[in-house]
Amino acid sequence: MQRIPYPVLTPAQEEQHARAKINLSKIMFLLPPKILAGMSAAGKAMLFESPYDPLLRELIILRVGYLSNCEYEAHQHRVYGRQMGLSDAQVEAAMAPTLGAPLTQREQDVLRFTEEVVVNVRPSDVALAGARRHLSDSEILETLFIISNYMFIARVIETSGIPLDAPGVIVSNPDK
């Protein structure tokens, strides 16, 4: 049930929302315009312009959605992750209580790191070392950005109570 109503959009906001289409983008118009613009630019860069492994990014987002009990996030990124090339088994494994096959050791180590960041804020030395076996320091920081961005989004979704999008409406690059 929606707990915070969508704002009444200006014509310019309606046009902008028509490019993104997902319910999440509509509730975000409650943010001050400069904050929304900055977040939109960062989100676009993360999803569509970063050299970060897109499949690993989607597994991280799925894990954050699972750990945050955010069905909307999990719903969106199940579909998007599959479009990016994740198998059904990988998608489900990222959202299982215990990590294991068919996830690779790299994926499991990064998702363990993700889980500890979400649950404990500061990951253990073991979890950090596991992630660092596979990721550069720059990629560790980008992993933290992905985790924190999707933790924020999950909290916006769950607090506002926005409904799932209609079937077939998923995250897309608004510039295409």
Image (cartoon, rainbow, N blue to C red):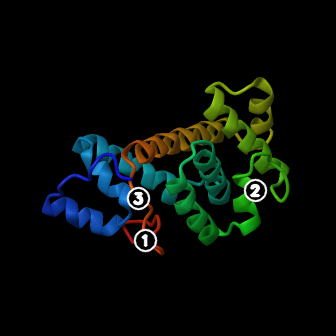
On screen, residue 48 above or below 152: below
Closer to the chain start, of discs 2 and 3, is 2
> Which residue carries the number 2 mark?
93
Kindly identify the amino acid type of the residue bearing the numbered disc 1. Ala
Q: Is residue 50 above or below residue 38?
A: below
Frontmost of labels 2 and 3 is 3
Residues packed near mark 2 inside 10 Å, few (<14), some (14 to 19) or many (20 plus): many
Q: Distance between the residues labelled 3 and 1?
A: 9 Å
Q: How crowded is mark 1: few (under 14 residues within 10 Å), some or many (20 or more)?
A: few
What is the quadrant of residue 158 in the picture?
A: top left
| Residue 58 x/y as whole percent | 62, 56
Disc 2 element: helix
Query: At 76% across and 65% down in the image, what residue appears?
Result: 89
> Disc 2 marks which amino acid?
Ala
**Foreground: disc 2 or disc 1:** 1
Q: Which of 78 and 55 is in front in this view?
A: 78
**What residue did someone put label 1 on?**
166
Measure the C-alpha gap from mark 2 to mark 3. 25 Å
Q: Where is residue 57 in the image (x, y as percent from the top left)?
A: 62, 53
Task: Kindly identify which residue carries mark 3.
Answer: 163
Query: Which mark sits nearer the N-terminus, 2 or 1?
Result: 2
Q: State the quadrant of the C terminus.
A: bottom left
- Name the residue located 17 percent from the left edge and 61 percent from the top edge: 12
